[in-house]
Image (spheres, rainbow, N blue to C red):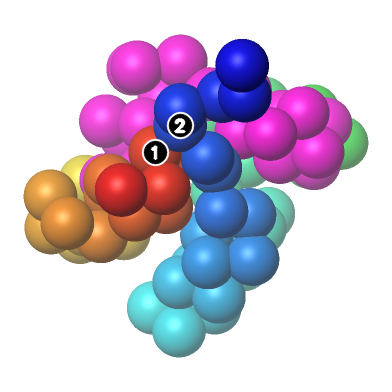
Amino acid sequence: MGDIMEFKKELLKGTVVARGYSMQDVAEWLDINLSTLYRKISRNGDFSRAEIKILTKRLNLDEQERDSIFFGI
């Protein structure tokens, strides 16, 4: 059985850029190296709940946007 949740990495990257930020900004918000951020992204969005909360706040995502990016809902 496949994963119910589907992380949408291109949607995350596009949202970051559309909001005027860079992936380096995202890494700094999460207090991780840029290479660690890309590794998380390549591992199908291996973000903790706390990290998702930080990104939701920093990117000013509404609930629907958050769910679409991180959970494919």
> Which residue range is magenta in the image?
37-56
User: What element does badge 2 sit on?
Assistant: loop
Number of other residues with Cα within 10 Å of mark 2, as a class: few under 14, some 14 to 19, many 20 or more: some
Q: Quadrant of residue 54?
A: top left
Image position, residue 20 (x, y; %): 46, 81
Q: Earlier in the sequence, mark 2 or mark 1?
A: 2
Amino acid type indicated by mark 2: Met
Q: Is residue 14 visible?
A: yes
Amino acid type indicated by mark 1: Phe
Q: Which residue is mark 2?
A: 5
Q: Main secondary structure of the magenta part?
A: helix
Instruction: Indicate left or right for 58 with 13 as reference.
Output: left
The residue sitting at 53% across, 66% down in the picture is 11
Give the vertical position of 47 relative to 26 (above or below).
Answer: above
Q: Which residue is mark 1?
A: 71
Cα distance in 3D space between marks 2 and 1: 5 Å
User: What element does badge 1 sit on?
Assistant: helix
The residue sitting at 77% across, 28% down in the picture is 43
Number of other residues with Cα within 10 Å of mark 1, as a class: few under 14, some 14 to 19, many 20 or more: some
Give the vertical position of 67 relative to 15 (above or below).
Answer: above
Give whichever of 59, 29 is nearer the camera: 59
**Does 28 lie within the magenta span?**
no
Q: Is residue 31 visible?
A: no
Q: Quadrant of residue 39?
A: top right
**Does 54 lie within the magenta span?**
yes
Instruction: Indicate left or right for 25 with 5 as reference.
Output: right
Give the vertical position of 2 relative to 24 (above or below).
Answer: above
CB-based contact (under 8 Å), mark 2 and mark 1: yes
Q: Quadrant of residue 5?
A: top left
